[in-house]
Amino acid sequence: MTIDPSVPINYLDAGLSVLPAIRERKHPAVGSWKAYQDRLPSEEEIEAWFSNKQNALCLVCGTISGNLEVIDFDNGGELFEKWKSQVPEKLFARMVVERTPSGGYHVAYRCEEPIQGNMKLAMGKRDEKVVTLIETRGEGGLFLCAPSGGYELLQGDFEALPVLSVEDRKTLLRVGFSLNEFVEEEPEPRQEPGSSTSFSVRPGDDYNQRGNIKELLLRYGWTYMEKKDGSELFRRPGKNSGGCSASLKDGVFYVFSTNAYPFQSEKGYSAFQVYAQLVHNGDFTKAADDLMRQGYGKDAIPDVDLSAIFDSPAPKETASPAESPIPEQELFVSVADFMSRHSELRPPIIHGFLREGETMNIIASPKTGKSWLVLDLAVSVAMGYEWQGYPCNQGRVLIIDNELHPDVLTWRLNQVLVERGVTQERLRDRMFIFSQRGRLQDINFMGTYMDQLAKANFKMIIVDAFYRVMPKNMDENDNGTMASVYNLIDRYAGTTGAAFVLIHHTTKGVQANKAITDVGAGAGSQSRACDTHVVLRRHQEEGVVVMDGVCRSFAPPLPCCLRFSFPVWNRDDSLSPAMLEGIEIQPKRTKSDPVSDVDNVLAMLDQPMVKGKLVATLQTELGYSYHKAREIVNTALELELIEERYEADPENHKRINKIISLK
């Protein structure tokens, strides 16, 4: 299906920032959409976008759309009915509600005051993985909605969104927070020098099970109010009357008040987090040390020591891991046994591109900016953010950098973090650097540290640049040599469970006429040996590249354009990926002149008419396309043969109609 252009025009008239979208990627189809967080698109922009048979649209949330916010129920909408049952019926009846293609739900509204950015309200573990169950789309966010394909409006209308009070909005969010099942883990306590002690149950986790959080809150001035719907309600210190400030349910302390220092509003805390905030001013390491002295926590196996990788020089002599013989039972396996053993694909890391334990090449011309792209990729995986329109599963990342001086790498990484709004502290236990500049070793060195790397549980290991870790005297143009190097990397990936991302360069000259697998310096076995081969080729527009690739375990990704806006690359779907540098540009077709059709408009205006109805009449009675009909009407306005004015809709006073009449 395609979107009727009248719908986005109506959304625009309702004060919503509406954009065309790529349904499969849940991403705007206009390239960089940051501008539309600060201004509404024009009618001309919407007409141009939606005249191209768009099949999806999205709305930008936040101030630009009148403080629009959406509560998004993920994972098949499993918590929607439970959430709905705890929301007052009259309040829920005011909401705009739609069903999403995945079986989830969107609940949309406006707020009388500005809202914050996206928030995760409820998380949970499903199949040993932490997943988002309920989240919001707020300032800086967007969402696809009806009439996009697969989205079904169940209640209300986006053209008449309700405006909630601050308290009503808090009620909706509070119920969402109360359904949270997961609290992010906190650091372990410090270890004494020379100690190898770790924990099978950490002090903080033990306190979450055995600690008396209610007694702790009362000791620090909180007032217990009552137990309601399974939640124990508390009033913050210094507040002697009025509603509750926080609730305690299933071991999680949810704070609603914006004046409950040291706690943040609209956030859930575990018992250990409450202890750390109240007793140790938010210092989790001190809190864990304190609880360890009180007898919390259980000893386990020795801790993982990565100092051999991050602090010590590599050994002088290195060797690749020894070949292990294939067990006899693995030599010949029946089809039925083989398929039953390997019935599921490995979990994805970059959806649509890369899975755990796979290898991926990223190939681009020298000085293109691929290292900036890879730093952004590392941050996206470490944080679980989207990367160039592709969702990423969160996991630990190691960057092995052998080109940049440490201070330059630090400066670059800081630029990317500032642009993406990520602090260094949030990456402390998620992203690691091994700088090889000045102590360069070849790829064999990693074999010495396989035990440490496996225990570190990295999800992705990035090698930038690949040519610098090639063993000495090996020829990158020799297929046999390169196949043996990739076999070694496959062995590392199998041992660590991490995906390896290898950054490499192209040959000199124009790459436009080459097949994807032929782009890259060296032997052709490089593209055949990896699981995913991604190439960046220059676009005809300055500062733009086309990203394309081939994958073994995903459908071929569609090529897309990336525009460099220092210090990051951003996807720009307003450009054609076909316009590679070196391809001749075809001249654009000229538009027809609608002036001769203006008389048809004048003939229909025997009485004033809503602009949308006039356009629709030209379509149905004279067979014009929607775009052509609007063009004719706008031409008549420019020639001052007709005029327009604004009037409130008699059936909906919140909506303003454009009335067209003869001049």
Image (cartoon, rainbow, N blue to C red):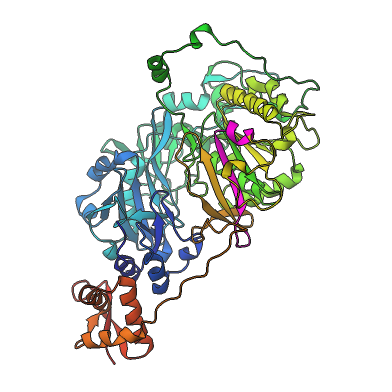
> 163 or 33: which is nearer to us?
33
User: Horizontal and vertical percent for residue 228?
Assistant: 26, 39
Residue 540 belongs to magenta span: yes
481 up-or-down from 147: above or below? above
> 111 or 618: which is nearer to us?
618
Q: Quadrant of residue 290?
A: top right
User: Horizontal and vertical percent for residue 54?
Assistant: 36, 60
136 up-or-down from 282: above or below? below
**Apparent side of residue 55 relative to residue 270 in the rendered image (left or right):** left
Q: How many marks?
A: 0
Residue 562 belongs to magenta span: no
Q: Is residue 241 visible?
A: no
Q: Quadrant of the N terminus?
A: bottom left
489 up-or-down from 12: above or below? above
User: Horizontal and vertical percent for residue 31?
Assistant: 50, 59
Q: Which residues are magenta?
A: 525-543
> 321 or 386: which is nearer to us?
321
Q: Is residue 86 visible?
A: yes
- Residue at 55 percent across and 59 percent down: it is 579
> 17 or 662: which is nearer to us?
662
Q: Quadrant of the C terminus?
A: bottom left
User: Horizontal and vertical percent for residue 207?
Assistant: 47, 26
- Residue at 21 percent across and 85 percent down: it is 604
